[in-house]
Image (cartoon, rainbow, N blue to C red):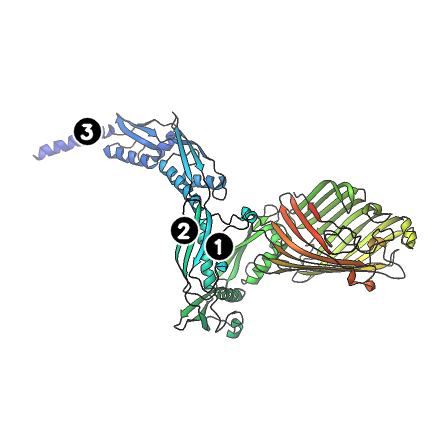
């Protein structure tokens, strides 16, 4: 028996290589593929050439290939040492069209493309009917959510001989459901009108307004938003137990009419019985922290005031280096409709700045941005310094948006990385062409003004004009960071010829050329500067008969009209944005004197101030004032071309340019030595227009007067106008338009009801 077993073992050992070699895969044959490459199929196989093949291998191959979703039928076999795989592919998407949709509020091409890509229905992908059904359902739900209950989508699927599929979805939107009425049930504290003001949808406005707002168009999304705002409205008034019992959306007769009934329970109004602090206070006294708390014992519970106080306390400690400080409000309701509030302060570790990075500046040099950031790598974290840095970057006017992201530095609990993400805007202005204006008449003009020259933060200005009244060449360069201490320097040359008769002024001609040089030094947080400028020029003047008739011939008596002017100035700028500020002040005081080393003897003091005051998150109040006083010395008069004139876009709107103030006997503007211009306006974004961040509207009142001299100031000569203005920062430049109507004027005043300006950017 033992001998027989040994013989069988020897035969098995001898024959095994022969049997095994008969199952070895020497070649893999793939057939039936059209869109799928051989390499792709091989990549998903669990075997390769040289491996053994058995029945289990066949199951693994079929399972792996089915998982890809590429194939709907797979056959696996072996002939001799060849592994044969025969497949039938699922169809591939050749084209996908979504037709007949028009309501971009619901869907648009961008959202469609993103959705198709995310669910795998884009061109070239394997067609999956389940995914198509999912997409159709998703589109229908989007329409229903916006009130389009009659939405219908017709599918057309065509597969050609090469297993390529063309998909068409034709959308029949139907009509949007409109709100017939919306009612609040159970309200006592607030009137229904007050509550419904929290909803962006409701009964139709006046039909012209409703055409733009579409307030009566039903939207489930906006209804849900309105309900959440209603909850906050009550909780801000102390109704902590407020709840919405039921929201009933009814369609009485057809799907295009909707009535909404919202049943609420207000509960009781809670008052605050006590306010306490706990946690880590450092060296800050309880009294100092309580000064930041805007509510006290006996006040009605107001969620907004609590959040405001928490933000103030958090800011206090964040400014001391505790970037991740938290204030947790702990409330406890009492049986007598009062609540105790405890603010628990958790500081965590003191935080230091690890790295500061910048992105988004494809044109502006990093250095230009970094020098406006007042917090440094390695310094203690400061919320105020970060806030000031953002404002300073905005004040440059180089960026339309600035965002800051902060995160814990990897591997450190007490270090934070700061990342400034900027969006560049167009900082250059280029305009060229024929023009007509009250200032210069008909002619050619070209202007290049680049506030961020070559991304360096420097300013280059070139202005050329050749019109009936004015021929001008002005070239100026400004470097706001001439030294590391933020001293700025400016210099330039100019040449100008003026024909006064073409400016609706009197007959005179001035030809002048010269240069200017200026220097400024910061004196307070870089928001305030003092500086000086020297202007030297050579001038020739030719006057008409009027000057002799008006006893002003001495204005043109000198053969040599050279002048050296010294200007001393003080400037302040705390605006929080360059284009559309909502807070801060911009002011300038300058004193200019024509030095007695040349032919002229006069001085001028000019004061300019703009202040922006935020009324709320959207409305801004703007106040502007301009005062100018000119005076001659050494027995000489102020030159007629240095007198003040008023009227026009930058003065009192509604009155024509240069028409305010004293006149000659021929009714031509004479100008005066004292000017006072005042303006107030309310500025707001335009909520009724989507994507209107670059637009503003305002209502304004302008007032002003020009008098012969400061001593002859007469308030009865004030001219007043009222109007509305619009500004739009378009891709080709800032566009402005205003309409105005004089409220206080005199007979003979020249008025203008509207004016329009536009520039072109690059």
Q: How many numbered circles does the render carry?
A: 3
The reply to whether the C-beta atoms of the residues labelled 1 and 2 are less than 8 Å apart is no
> What residue is disc 3 on?
15
Alpha carbons under labels 3 and 1: distance apart: 87 Å
- The front one of 360 and 416 is 360
The circle drawn on residue 199 is 1
Residue 467 rendering spot, x and y as whole percentages: 79, 42
The circle drawn on residue 579 is none
320 lies left or right of 562: left
Residue most toward the left? 1
Q: From where the camera sits, is residue 557 visible?
A: no
- The front one of 201 and 578 is 201
Residue 40 rendering spot, x and y as whole percentages: 38, 33
Disc on the earlier residue, 1 or 2: 1
469 lies left or right of 303: right
Quadrant of image for the N terminus = top left
Q: Residue at x 66, y 51 (%)?
A: 725
Of labels 3 and 1, the one closer to you: 1
> What residue is disc 2 on?
249
Give the quadrant of residue 612.
bottom right
133 lies left or right of 288: left
Residue most toward the front? 253
Q: Is residue 130 above or below residue 541?
A: above
- Circle 2 Cα neighbour tier, 10 Å, few/some/many (<14 / 14–19 / ≥20): some
Give the quadrant of residue 721.
bottom right
Q: Is residue 106 above or below residue 229?
A: above
Q: Secondary structure at mark 3?
A: helix
């Amino acid at each position: 028996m033992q001998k027989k077993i040994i013989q069988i073992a020897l035969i098995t050992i001898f024959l095994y290589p022969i049997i095994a070699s008969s199952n070895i895969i020497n070649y893999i044959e793939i057939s039936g593929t059209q869109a799928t490459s051989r390499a792709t199929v091989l990549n998903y196989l669990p075997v390769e050439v040289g491996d053994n093949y058995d029945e289990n291998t066949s199951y693994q191959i079929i399972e792996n290939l089915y998982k890809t979703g590429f194939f709907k039928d797979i056959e696996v076999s072996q002939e001799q040492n060849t592994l044969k795989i025969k497949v039938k592919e699922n169809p591939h998407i050749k084209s996908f069209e979504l037709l007949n949709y028009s309501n971009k509020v619901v869907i648009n091409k961008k959202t469609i493309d993103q959705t198709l890509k995310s669910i795998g229905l884009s061109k070239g992908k394997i067609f999956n009917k389940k995914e198509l059904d999912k997409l159709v359902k998703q589109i229908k739900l989007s329409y229903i959510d916006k009130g389009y209950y009659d939405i219908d989508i017709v599918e057309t699927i065509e597969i050609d001989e090469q297993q390529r599929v063309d998909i068409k979805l034709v959308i029949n939107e139907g009509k949007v459901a409109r709100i017939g009425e919306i009612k609040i049930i159970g309200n006592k504290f607030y009137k229904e009108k007050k509550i419904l003001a929290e909803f962006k949808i409701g009964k139709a406005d006046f039909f012209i307004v409703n055409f733009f707002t579409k307030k009566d168009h039903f939207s489930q999304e906006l209804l849900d938003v309105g309900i959440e705002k209603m909850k906050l409205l009550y909780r801000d008034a102390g109704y902590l137990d407020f709840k919405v019992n039921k929201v009933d959306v009814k369609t009485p007769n057809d799907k295009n009419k909707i009535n909404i009934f919202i049943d609420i329970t207000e509960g009781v109004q809670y008052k605050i019985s006590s306010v306490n602090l706990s946690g880590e206070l450092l060296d800050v006294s309880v009294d100092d922290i309580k000064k930041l708390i805007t509510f006290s014992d006996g006040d009605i519970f107001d969620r907004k005031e609590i959040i405001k106080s928490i933000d103030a306390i958090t800011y206090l400690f964040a400014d001391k280096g505790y970037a991740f400080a938290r204030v947790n409000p702990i409330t406890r309701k009492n049986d007598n409709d009062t609540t105790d509030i405890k603010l628990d302060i958790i500081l965590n570790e003191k935080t230091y700045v690890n790295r500061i990075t910048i992105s988004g500046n494809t044109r502006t040099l990093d250095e230009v941005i970094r020098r406006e950031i007042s917090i440094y790598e390695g310094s203690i974290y400061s919320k105020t310094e970060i806030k000031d840095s953002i404002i300073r970057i905005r004040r440059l006017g180089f960026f339309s948006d600035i965002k800051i992201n902060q995160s814990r530095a990897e591997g450190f609990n007490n270090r934070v990385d700061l990342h400034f993400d900027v969006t560049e805007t167009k900082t250059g202005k280029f305009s060229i062409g024929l023009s007509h204006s009250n200032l210069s008449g008909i002619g050619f003009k070209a202007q290049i003004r680049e506030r961020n020259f070559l991304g360096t933060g420097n300013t280059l200005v070139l202005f050329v004009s050749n019109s009936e009244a004015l021929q001008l060449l002005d070239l100026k360069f400004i470097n706001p960071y001439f030294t590391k201490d933020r001293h700025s320097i400016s210099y330039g040359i100019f040449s100008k010829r003026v024909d006064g008769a073409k400016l609706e002024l009197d007959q005179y001609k001035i030809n002048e050329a010269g240069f200017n040089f200026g220097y400024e030094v910061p004196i307070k947080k870089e928001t305030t500067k003092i500086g000086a400028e020297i202007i030297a020029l050579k001038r020739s003047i030719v006057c008409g008969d009027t000057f002799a008739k008006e006893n002003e011939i001495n204005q043109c008596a000198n053969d040599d009209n050279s002048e050296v002017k010294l200007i001393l100035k003080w400037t302040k700028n705390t605006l929080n944005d360059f284009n559309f500020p909502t807070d801060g002040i911009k002011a300038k005081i300058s004193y200019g004197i024509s030095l007695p080393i040349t032919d002229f003897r006069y001085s001028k003091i000019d004061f300019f101030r703009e202040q922006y005051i935020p009324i709320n998150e959207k409305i801004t109040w703007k106040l502007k004032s301009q005062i100018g006083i000119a005076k001659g010395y050494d027995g000489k008069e102020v030159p007629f071309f240095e007198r003040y004139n008023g009227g026009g876009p930058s003065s009192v709107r509604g009155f024509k340019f240069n028409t305010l103030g004293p006149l000659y006997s021929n009714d031509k503007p004479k100008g005066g030595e004292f000017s006072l211009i005042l303006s107030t306006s309310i500025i707001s974004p335009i909520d009724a227009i989507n994507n209107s961040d670059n637009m503003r509207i305002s209502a304004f009142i302008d007032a002003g007067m020009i008098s012969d001299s400061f001593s002859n100031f007469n308030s009865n000569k004030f001219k007043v106008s009222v109007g509305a203005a619009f500004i739009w920062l378009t891709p080709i430049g800032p566009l402005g338009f205003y309409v105005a109507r004089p409220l206080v004027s005199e007979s003979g005043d020249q008025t203008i009801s509207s004016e329009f300006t536009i520039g072109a950017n690059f």
